[in-house]
Image (cartoon, coloured by chain):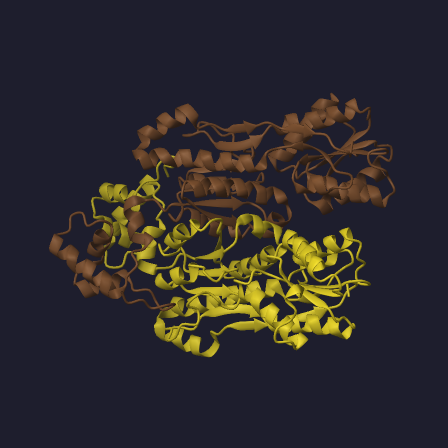
Chain colours: A yellow, B brown
Amino acid sequence: MVSEPNGPRPTLEAVAARAGVSRATVSRVVNGGAGVRAVVQERVRQAVRELGYVPNSAARTLVTRRTGAVAVVIAEPETRVFTDPFFGRQLRGISRALAAADTQLLLMFVEHRTDYDRIGRYLSAGHVDGALMFSLHRDDPLPAMAERAGLPTVYGGRPGWAGADRAPRAAPLLYVDTDNRDGARQAVRHLLDRGRRRIAVITGPLDQTSALDRLDGYREALGAAEPDPRLIADGGFTAQGGERAMARLLDAAPDLDAVFACSDLMANGALRTLRARGHRVPDDVAVVGYDDLEPAAWADPPLTTVRQDVEEMGRLMAGLLLRLLDPRRAGGAEGAEAAGAVELAPVITEARLVVREST
Amino acid sequence: MVSEPNGPRPTLEAVAARAGVSRATVSRVVNGGAGVRAVVQERVRQAVRELGYVPNSAARTLVTRRTGAVAVVIAEPETRVFTDPFFGRQLRGISRALAAADTQLLLMFVEHRTDYDRIGRYLSAGHVDGALMFSLHRDDPLPAMAERAGLPTVYGGRPGWAGADRAPRAAPLLYVDTDNRDGARQAVRHLLDRGRRRIAVITGPLDQTSALDRLDGYREALGAAEPDPRLIADGGFTAQGGERAMARLLDAAPDLDAVFACSDLMANGALRTLRARGHRVPDDVAVVGYDDLEPAAWADPPLTTVRQDVEEMGRLMAGLLLRLLDPRRAGGAEGAEAAGAVELAPVITEARLVVREST
């Protein structure tokens, strides 16, 4: 086999020329040879061998329409993905489930709004069989892109983008989430049980449903339609954001005796501010986090937090997508519909309070 | 346009049937219509509009052979990629350079040896224009796969895999590295200048050239052909590995007065062991790390370390690959060769000692 390292790849056209047949014939042979005479097939295969032609997806996809790959799009900049352990853990679950199904994972980030067009182009260009998308924001264009491209997609987190509740819809939106509202209720009830009465909340960005649902759970547990606005601050789901939000809360409500931070990273940031200002945890201020990932155990004191099984959520997302793709593989829309009726539905996993030294 | 959200995508076959032409004709029209009569072209375009067919890469790639995407393959499990800040930082540089060239980044990990085949299939199937590969190990099959597929590839780190030094080669291997040997020499000379005489080294896995080159630099600075083997331990480039290696070194050579850890993560692990065993840093044992990423600044005491500009290395890798791809875009192999002769060569960046409190 002749190979030209780092040189131009032999083209389908070159194979066609060498074999003296049309491009379409080469394409047919590369994809199994149906409808091509045996003698012509052999001539094409000979040319393929002589040129070291690697049959590419272009030809194969035309026939099978399968690439064996799934895009995982995280609608966050790479910096956030690499500093928040939530993403790595979710990816671990996804990566293992996809590998078990011999499906290639392609990870993409969204650094700037200008990236969306390019991602949309790649996703609709037939290079992937489906997509997993998470950390979407309210004005995210990705779901509409996936829908336009007819790309089978499963979402991480309850859909909250503009148009997500539009009906009728040909197929239900598929997603995996935890019961964020219930998790938040457990956190706040635990603080009430501990005798705390001025309970603040540090929220995530309120253009994400996970942040909204946790804030709703906080409100419900307090039983107040409109809790004291001085007790609510946005920490943007980052440690630095949590640090700054805690400072704003202490300034606005110096009598607060507890804080529910809607992620462990933000809780760690809050702990730093409390320490810097000389507040003892939990004696002066009790702190609850959310996620139960590494930062919860590393924290000083170790964090009471709401556990969500992030790796399992990743596994479930990948599982839903693989089931969505599978009936097609098995052949045809009928199978897909039958399977869809039985098992293709959103999955909500359970949230569970883990009590440690910070409360 | 009729769109079927999450339903099956309209196929090329469906368009062909609706327009009453062959698949090859549809493909030709979708790709510009060369050689197809105007009236037939219009019939096909009409069918495309009616069915909401999204022309996919299959058809387009056959003609343009460009996807606008580049694979970034890190030959490490996802868990390592997400716990070692080196990778996130390198990716930041890559991601910014690719985005500036409107090129889509597809990130892939290697979890198990069984993943290689699947990655090789995706890379050679025409879904990407080129690849960046890093953290390769000696027996890594990825470079051979890229070479067989004729995929333009730039490597992170000096090639050290079996066959990398094979000549003649149609094109030189392109890579970006720091001067690891010189960085290690600077670290050890600094310890000698501080009056240390029993200097141990914690190496990375010796099937990677970065680990080998740093060990060589250590040897050279000591001026000993064969340094005391009790002063050398492999820490596998992880914090836990550094922790355990430091313990082995202290057991084997209790009189050591300094340690050069070949990554900041391993240096942090070593600090934990030294603290646990009651050794003061730097009074009893001086410690130097390598990388100058976050763990160096977080360390207690802050680490003297060898700075390599990891983000810049990522940027340089992406830049080399884009230049490698560009002449083809501009048209033809002649341009590629001319450009190659002038500027397409490996890049070695400088390493520089940063002195802090640990020495």
Number of marks drawn: 0
**Quadrant placement of the C terminus of chain A:** bottom right
Depicted A148 relative to depicted A27: above or below: below
- B79 horizontally vs B14: left or right: right
x, y percent for residue B39: 11, 56
Furthest residue toward top:
B223
Depicted A187 relative to depicted A205: above or below: below
- The residue at the point 38 percent across, 45 percent down is B68
- The residue at the point 27 percent across, 54 percent down is A28
x, y percent for residue B320: 45, 33
Q: Nearer the viewer, residue B224 or B333?
A: B333
- A334 horizontally vs B207: left or right: left
Is residue B226 among the parts visible in the rendering? no
**Quadrant placement of the N terminus of chain A:** top left
Q: Nearer the viewer, residue A346 or A158?
A: A158
Q: Nearer the viewer, residue B82 or A20?
A: B82
- B97 horizontally vs B194: left or right: left
x, y percent for residue A338: 41, 77
x, y percent for residue B331: 30, 34
Is residue A182 among the parts visible in the rendering? yes
